[in-house]
Structures are given as C-alpha cells and as structure tokens.
Image (cartoon, rainbow, N blue to C red):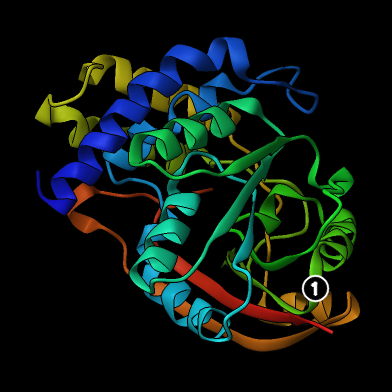
Amino acid sequence: MSGPDRQRQDLIECATLARRIAPATCRVDPALGEACAWYHGFWPYLRLLEVVGSPYRHQGFFREALAPSIAGGNRGRVLVSGAVDYAMPALAIDIYREAGAALDLTVADICETPLALVRWYGARIGVSLATSAGDILDYAPGGVFDVILTHSFLAMFPPDRRRALLRRWRLLLRPGGVVVTISRLRPDSSEARIGFTPLEAENFIAAVGRAAQGGLLDLDAKALVAGARAYVERQRIWPVRTAAEIEALFQDSGFRLERLEENWTERAAAKGAASGPTAKGGAYAMIVAVRS
C-alpha cells in the first residue's frame, strides 16, 4: 500500500474507532453540559471528507520550524499540547523519523478520546509514546521539553486565559525551547466566543453532503450530514484576531518570537469547503516562539 493510500486507510480505521469509543471516553464539556463525542467521535470523518484543516495541511511550515531544533541535537523531547486526533503526533513522528532524529513524544489533552486514538496510532506504526489526560494548565510532568507543538489550540481558550496557557508552556520548556504552532486569524471578530453563522452552517453541511457522495466510508451520506449538523450546532471557539495580538501575548509571557507571519490558504473549492470555525481557508498565523 502506497504512502497516501496507507494514510487514508489509517484515517478510515481511526474514524470508525473514534465513533465507537467516543460515547464512553469523551468528557462532559462544562460549557455545553454534554460529552464531546459529537466532536471527537466525528472529527476524523471531517478530515476524510477534506472539509476541515489539519496539521498536514501546514506540514511545510512545521518541517521548516522544527529543522533547527532537530539539527541542534537535543534530546527530542516533544510535547503535543492538545490533539483532536492523531494528526499532530503523526506529523511529528514523520518529521523526526525522516531526519533520523530521536523523538521522545508526549501528547496531552483534556479528553481521553484523542489520547486513545494517539495510542492506537502509535501501536499501529510501532512507536512508543506517552499520553496525559487533564487540563494543560495543571500539567506538571516533572521534566521539561525541547519543543511544544500545537495546531489551532489558542482558540480553545478565552482571551483572559491565554496568558495562563503560555505561562504553563513556558514552565514546560527548557530555556531556549520552542513553541511551534499555527492559529487561524479572524480580524473582523470580537473577543466573544463564536460558532457557525446560519449561512456558514448551511454551506458546511452542504459541503459535507457533496463530499460524502463517494460512498467509501462506513457511514452513508445521510449519517455524515447528520453528524455535520450536530457539529456546526455545537462547535464554538474564541477568535484569535490579529498577528499583533499574538505578538503581544507571547512577548508578555516570556517568549521571543522567532517567526510570526500570516499565511493565506486557499479554499478547497472542489470540495465546497465553507467558512466557519475549523473550516479550511483563511488567514493563519505561523508562529515559532523561543522560551527566554
């Protein structure tokens, strides 16, 4: 099986597993008063349908950003802070493996479901890794990391909690360690938590319906559309608005920004990807921050 075919098969099997385990393993989200199975149990399907972003969409940036750390010959202690499924850990494994570099990988998330998917993927490819379930703001592993990797994680925190997040990241890094992350920018938003607008929701659900017509998954188009509807009704994020906002956040939290640039990604017109939280397309901030 070729590389892309193997990656797709991995994701298909992950989607089936996520849907099966999420009702039992997902935590109850206090903001919604219900478990997050609608999210973690459905996300791999959205990736398969190519209507949401993922770290692999920005793998060129992550490869460039990690190259100096790998070349520096550090211990390869890497923390993935937040993982909706196995994509970010898998990309880290790919990058370090291709460089022939040592990787001591830990994945932390508040929900057990993505961690179970990460462990499943690690066992599938024969890679040993550690996982930790709990609030990242309380995470204290007793050691420090060389690198913290995240993807679209800042928007999971309200603005008044982001400095606490960055202070925790700083404590988790050795001096000179780096945070490598990407965050969607929404300059026209307020600081209030947002979801899909009615039009965005309609377009997103329609995009899922169109992409689902291939009939190659274990859910039919009707079930996938129903999952997409549940997703757009519940998904909420706190917008990260501008690169200047990110710059101030990192600098005030004890980091030196080595790289901060905006990158516009195209919309996947063939798939009909829509706007809205987690949808593909828009401006992204590419961030490499060094712990002072």
Query: What residue type is disc 1 on?
Result: Arg
Residue 5 is at least partly visible in this image: yes
Which quarter of the rendered picture does the C terminus lie within? bottom right
Q: Position of residue 165 (x, y in %)?
A: 83, 57
* 273 is higher (above) or lower (below) than 92: above
Q: Residue 129 vs residue 135: left or right?
A: left
Q: Residue 135 vs residue 19: left or right?
A: right
User: 171 or 141: nearer the eye?
Assistant: 141
Residue 151 is at least partly visible in this image: no
Helix, strand or loop at label 1? It is strand
- Residue shown at 58%/33% (left/top)? 115
* 287 is higher (above) or lower (below) than 124: below
Q: Which residue is mark 1?
A: 174
- Residue shown at 17%/52% (left/top)? 3
- Residue shown at 40%/67% (left/top)? 95
* 268 is higher (above) or lower (below) than 203: below
Q: Position of residue 134 (x, y in %)?
A: 78, 35
For residue 269, what is the image quadrant?
bottom left
- Residue shown at 54%/40% (left/top)? 84
Q: Position of residue 12 (x, y in %)?
A: 27, 30
User: 175 or 26: nearer the eye?
Assistant: 175
Q: Residues within 10 Å of mark 1 (few under 14, many from 20)?
A: some
User: 123 or 32: nearer the eye?
Assistant: 123
Q: Residue 18 vs residue 34: left or right?
A: left
* 69 is higher (above) or lower (below) than 133: below
